[in-house]
Image: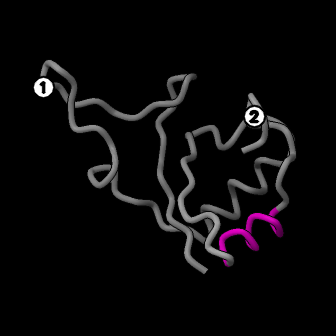
Amino acid sequence: MGGFSGSDPVYTVEKLEAMVKNGELKYFMISDGGMGGRGGSAELTQWIKEHGTAVPTEEWKSTGNNNGESRSMQDRRGQNMTLYEVKL
């Protein structure tokens, strides 16, 4: 959401809320640094965290690679990711 870097203010909180209510969106993946580093994404990240529930990582992340080792989900900057489910 928000262009290549995630910082373009494509959505407002109101638009995001409407999309969730209409069943267009339900899940959001957010890194430790939020969605993008600039722009209005901080408001979106805050809204998602306030209205969503973190999905336990065991329910969605990869459990291993070819060597049988556990992997954590990280974004391109190496920050951990959290999956949120939002129901309104």
* Local crowd size for mark 2, using a 10 Å CA cut-off: few (<14), some (14–19), many (≥20): few
Which residue is drawn at the image coordinates 56% and 69% (left, top)? 86
Q: Position of residue 49 (x, y in %)?
A: 60, 62
Stretch of the chain drawn in magenta? 13-21
Residue at (80%, 37%) from the top-left corner?
Answer: 7
- Would you say 28 lies left or right of 5 here? left
Question: Relative to residue 39, is residue 52 depicted above or below?
Answer: below
- Mark nearer the N terminus (2 vs 1): 2
Q: Which amino acid type is shown beneath numbered disc 2?
A: Gly
Secondary structure at numbered mark 2: loop
Which residue is labeled 1 in the image? 68
| Residue 19: image location, x then y, percent | 71, 68
Q: Residue at image x 67%, y 78%?
A: 21
Residue 81 sits inside the magenta stretch: no
Residue 20, picture quadrant: bottom right
Label 2 or label 1, whichever lies nearer to me, is: 1
Q: Mark 1 belongs to which amino acid?
A: Gly
Which residue bears the numbered disc 2?
Answer: 37
Placement of the C terminus among the 4 image quadrants: bottom right
